[in-house]
Amino acid sequence: MTSPSSLRSAPTGIVQLLAWALVVIVLCPASLAGGPKYVAGASYFNSSVMGVPITWAQGLPTYYTDQGSLSSIMSNPMADAYVADAFSRWNTVTTAALQVNQAGHLAEDVNGTNVTRDAQGNITMPADIQSTATAKPIGVVYDADGAVTDALLGVGAGSAAMCFSNTTYGGPDAFTTSGNFAHALVVINGNCIQNSAQVPDFQYRLIRTLGRVLGLGWSQVNDNVLSGNPPPTAQDYAGFPLMHTMDPVNCVPISSCYPNPTQLTMDDQAAISRLYPVTAQNIGGFPGKHLFADTTGRIHGSVWFTDANGNPIQPMQGVNVVARWVDPVSHQVTRQYAMASVSGFLFSGNAGNTVTGFTDPGGNRWDRFGSNDTALEGFFDFAGLQFPDGSDVATYQLTVEAADLTWSQLLEPYGPWQVLPSGSAQPVLVTVNRGGAMQQDLLMLGSASQERDMREPETYTAPAKLPGAGDWLGTLSGYGDADYFWFSGRVNRTLSVQVTALDETGAPTQDKGRPVIGMWGLSSPPGTVPGVATPTAFNTTTYGLSALQGLWAAQLQITGDFRLGIADERGDGRPDFAYHARLFYADTITPARVAAGGGTVVGIKGYGFGGGTTVAIGGTSASVASRTANLVVSAAPALNDGVQDVVLSDSTGASTSMIGALTYGAGPNDSIVLLAGANPSVAVGTEAPNPMLVRVVGPDGMTPVPGASVYFNTSPAAALSACGGGPNCTVLSDEHGEASTRIIPATTGLITINAVLAPASYTSPKYVQTTLSAQSSALDIALAWPTRYGAQGASVDTVLTARVLSYGSPVSGKTVNFQVMTGSAGLSSASAVSDNSGYASTTVQLRNLVGQVQVSACIAPNNTPCAKYPLNVYVVALSSLQMEAVSGSAQLVAVGQTFQPVVVRITDSASPPDPVLGATVTFWSIVTRPDNDVFDESGGERGMPVILASAQSTAISDVSGLASVTPASLGIAGPIEVEISATAGITAVHNFEAESAWMPPGTNWPGVRAKWPVRKRTEHLGSAYRDLRGDTGR
Amino acid sequence: MRKKSILTAAVLFTLFIPTASAQQRNQVTLRQLTRPAGYIFLGRVKSVQYLPATHANQVATVRVRFQVEQGLRGVRSGKQFTIRQWAGLWDAGERYRTGERLLLFLYPTSKLGLTSPVAGPRGRFALDRNGQVLLGMERTALLRDSLEQERRDRIPLVKLLREVRNYEEE
């Protein structure tokens, strides 16, 4: 950890050491080391200079200073002198072919009055400090009162309080295609030089700024001077380069941290010499200087990833390689004579990628800086090694280290996105002669060694199929590697893609690969801008996670195939760029329509689901019964009719939406049709002979819509069987889209009965209506449900109820005579006395029904009046029997809960169909272990199941045609699946499936869930009708 | 000759160096980031647009649009906020990337309509995996006079914002 005191004061005695070092530096020829700030790349610059550091041509740039004073204490001439002095620190390096001279002054005093904005909002400055002013290659502005700084950086930036950051600033702003700087601008803030005490800091910052102007990169040597770990020694300070990346904010004045802050170290001198080496060709222009190559030594090589056998497999960029002189007397490794070279310093640190593009916001290609020659990817160069003891032979120890993420984040070429090294290399001793060169590669043992993914090729033009679970591991290995996958998707879906960068241990990291994610249509040709992409790596608040989610969630615009691409943001690729990817995508929901009011079990298929996946439908949380990577089974929550979005999400921020994928009950384009409802005039208080029957159908006008809300209402009020005798209510259409009610008028006159489709969901709901005329007299009698249908050969008892009224009021004590008029049937009683509600009943005993049966009902003693519509039971041939599933399909319950009954309705083949009484329904049940596909109408994809138990039972359909059985475990413990096959007559068959499952801990499973609600069987009015359920088979 | 004498005078001038403590008021602290800031907010970069110069005297700028998550000064939470920055800073490496989430202390807009982070990169904070503001050892001293946490390299966003608000009320 940093110790402030260690940063403020140098150890006693360091001054002497520095003095000695200064002597050595002066006497010994300087050399070349460190890294350049800019290296010509694959674009913009001539190809002949690719990989060459960018410098001022011939090392002879000129500069022009402001005409004004720098501050109240620093006149223009004095300021010029300080600038000249700062340049001279670099000019005087004896192996650097560099001579920067002042060629004159700018054409003006640059100040707040000529850095302005015009009425059109254009910002202007004097032309001779613009980047285009190449005739004055380096412009130096004396911002005497901070007004220029205020104008350029913001109000207050030029104040004295901001001197730590804004004393001097600027740098190169134009380049020639031949690989040279064309222009640079430096601004010096006069507010930071208001007294003599501030001058040393001003000098220090100016020399560093000019170092950048000359093309120097940052350097990392003896970073413990900054970090305090280990505590710095005098040698550390002596070897600490002027061109280190940054200073602690408490270094005011700078001498409080460094004893001799403006002193160039061996690393600084080597760095500037490397950019501007004195050679045999140019030495004539630099009298008194020394040939660079001849007077220094050089060690160079590459850093390599290695395979399991220690063989090199790929160059490793971004490793800070440090060379330290070994004292031949003490055999100690010194820290004063040290220099650094970052591996791959000539190679591109950021070339862009196919996802976020290859150009910066200014339209400049990222790869204009840094070579694309992979031979340079791990290259380091210690040209310029000195011989501190004056001999012609020196031994240097080479070590490797990571860029310090705190103090050297901006170190080139990876800065600001450093990559931690992979593996380690043992220190190596290399002996080099003056004027000589040695090659020494460094093998990083134990490094990541994944050269290719198993799935390769995963290229743009040959993408791999998306791994089945939607969750996979990969590596961006090999420079420029990007992984592409394809999958099929649907329109109106959103999805998330998450990619977590991993280090060698599999832990999330932001110091290895920088994954960016893009998506294209599979047919998009190479070079197409992705339809959606992460704007940058790690665009989430989760460490190491890049994601197409939230603001950058992908929405599919078509149904088709898509390409998913993962690349490193820098366009890099290395064996240690591992990642964990997940596509979180909900593709289908089954069934696509559920009953209004919810409860239906739905299965959602897709990719990348996990234990934490949650489901919300229409914004309402839904219970989840089970989750696998590709399937979530859930229960639709209670919602009104309409189209709803289904959203799956989890705590990682991943989310996928199926927009408008699930319809509750009636959709906006569904309709309601009247199937039956016409009736003759009836007496008040008696049931109309025919029910009102409606069907909800889809947009095609034919497809039945089950589970839709149908609101029955009457005007004036009448009793409706569907409403338990009330005048209005909402019921759900059954599995055939039907809803019905019987009607008892309460008043005379014309009654209107409406069936309205989902009025709670739609402002102008669709509806149908019928009317019923009612009258009354002194004595009326009518039969309930006078027209019935019986299965051929049926032997069943059915209750027949008559009602006696006078002007609509029940009449008790009247004897009603029943008589079989046609066909063969028995009666439990030939007469019955009306009760307080006017009801009188008998049981019609049908036996081996073969022909129509008619039974009359008349009031004794004179058998007048008689019911206008006698009971007629018509025979339905077994070959005409049809079966409708009413309820109980696709049930899912928690283990231990009881299933709902499975209910079928037996009908004839008429249109609309009539319920058939007395049909024998056989239920075959088998019990197996569940396959979690209860929602799947196709029956799922399971192979032959193992039958654990089986049973058979029969039931006789009642007057409503209903027959039922309750699924049972048949003694099998634990989760089960009960498959039931119901048959009736010759061809009527229907299959049901019910499952039980262990629910995830904490699941609030809403009891028994089934596909469709059980339709009420009490379609009959009045207490006397309740015993219609007592129909029994014989 | 004249140049040499001026330089000699300058060197002598630098010998009169006051004590360190007298200058430490120039250190960058959280207070010093807060006070001069015209805009303080947590936001995410929505877009970056380079606006090149179109004629000789004109200055290139970079327009950066933010989605403000929490506005503390000068901007409102939930709104978008656009700044223009001198392109010279962009050339020097002070860049924004679309998607970046940052806590920014920006100078008030200058007469040119430009701004930049207070104290350069020190007025610009990234957040870590837990939503903590990354200080780095280099900036721990920002907190030394307020939070007494100079040994830590990160701080919860909430805590830092609270401190900023305290300074606002001073």
Image (tube, rainbow, N blue to C red):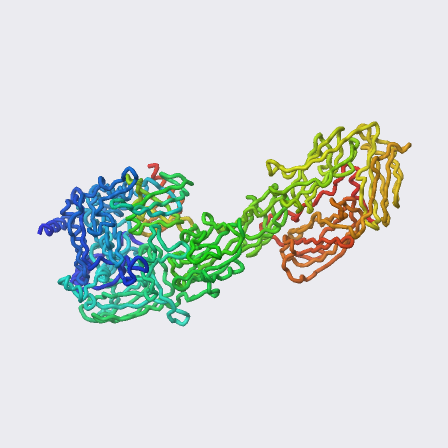
At 23% from the left and 56% from the top, the residue drawn is A214
**Residue B144 visible in the current orientation:** no
Left or right: A800, with A170 as reference point: right
Q: Position of residue A163 (x, y in %)?
A: 25, 46
Q: Is residue A972 above or below residue A660?
A: below
At 91% from the left and 32% from the top, the residue drawn is A862
Q: Is residue A373 above or below residue A109?
A: below
In the displayed orientation, state which residue is furthest to the left: B1
Q: Position of residue A822 (x, y in %)?
A: 88, 43
Query: Which quadrant is home to the N terminus of chain A?
Result: bottom left
Q: Position of residue A229 (x, y in %)?
A: 31, 58
**Which residue is at the front of the view, A460 or A406?**
A460
Left or right: A393, with A1027 as reference point: left
Q: Is residue A802 above or below residue A923?
A: above
Left or right: A977, with A1026 as reference point: left
Q: How many marks?
A: 0
Question: What is the quadrant of residue A333 in the picture?
Answer: bottom left
Q: Position of residue A937 (x, y in %)?
A: 65, 53
**Which residue is at the front of the view, A937 or A431?**
A937
Question: What is the quadrant of residue A1031 in the picture?
Answer: top right
**Residue A318 visible in the current orientation:** yes
